[in-house]
């Protein structure tokens, strides 16, 4: 959508019009990418579930292990693996203590959103 709003730009070096690259769009818009938004929301939800009582269904489902035969090829990324990776990117030291205090858990998430550390551009 932003690409259409911002429109094409004239490239002086090549002397023709071109569309903006994703990096140029993100730099000019200064909004979080979809990837950043998904990662932050995933970490927020993880903190919410961790603060729940042990008897609550979402918390029980989070740690259920289904015993199935694996498919051929590369193993699928599971939700829990993605959360682990997100915590590592944000700076996951001492997250076990922080997760039970809502304000302490939100601090690294706010920092990550402001610094945009969750965005890993593909080169």
Image (cartoon, rainbow, N blue to C red):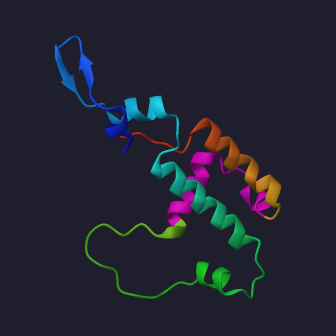
User: Which region shows up in magenta?
Assistant: 81-99
Q: Residue at 52% x, 34% y: name it.
A: 30
Q: Residue at 62% x, 44% y: name it.
A: 113
Quarter of the image for residue 59 reads bottom right
In this rendering, does residue 54 appear at all?
Answer: yes
Q: Residue 64: x, y in percent?
A: 57, 84
Q: Residue 52: x, y in percent?
A: 76, 77
- Number of numbered discs overlaid on the protein picture: 0
Q: Quadrant of the C terminus?
A: top left
Q: Residue at 57% x, 39% y: name it.
A: 116
Q: Nearer the viewer, residue 31 or 100?
A: 31
Q: Is residue 56 above or below residue 101?
A: below
Q: Quadrant of the N terminus?
A: top left
Q: Is residue 1 left or right of residue 66?
A: left
Q: Nearer the viewer, residue 16 or 89?
A: 16
Q: Is residue 30 above or below residue 86?
A: above
The outermost residue toward the top is 13
Q: Is residue 42 above or below residue 93?
A: below
Q: Residue 12: x, y in percent?
A: 23, 11
Q: Is residue 123 left or right of residue 106?
A: left
Asked if the stretch drawn in magenta spans residue 69, the answer is no
Q: Residue 51: x, y in percent?
A: 77, 71
In this rendering, does residue 123 appear at all?
Answer: no
Q: Residue at 26% x, 70% y: name it.
A: 73
Q: Is residue 101 above or below residue 68?
A: above
Q: Main secondary structure of the magenta part?
A: helix
Q: Is residue 9 left or right of residue 121?
A: left
Q: Nearer the viewer, residue 72 or 79?
A: 79
Asked if the stretch drawn in magenta spans residue 93, the answer is yes
């Amino acid at each position: 959508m932003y690409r259409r709003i911002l429109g094409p730009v004239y490239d002086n070096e090549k002397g023709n019009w071109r569309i903006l690259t994703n990096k140029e769009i993100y730099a000019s818009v200064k909004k979080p990418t979809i990837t950043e938004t998904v990662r932050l929301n995933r970490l927020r939800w993880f903190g919410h579930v961790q603060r729940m009582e042990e008897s609550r269904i979402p918390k029980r489902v989070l740690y259920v292990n289904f015993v199935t035969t694996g498919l051929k090829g590369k193993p699928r990324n599971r939700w829990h693996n993605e959360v682990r990776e997100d915590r590592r990117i944000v700076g996951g030291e001492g997250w076990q203590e922080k997760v039970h205090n809502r304000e302490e858990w939100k601090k690294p998430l706010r920092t990550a959103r402001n610094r945009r550390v969750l965005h890993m551009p593909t080169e």
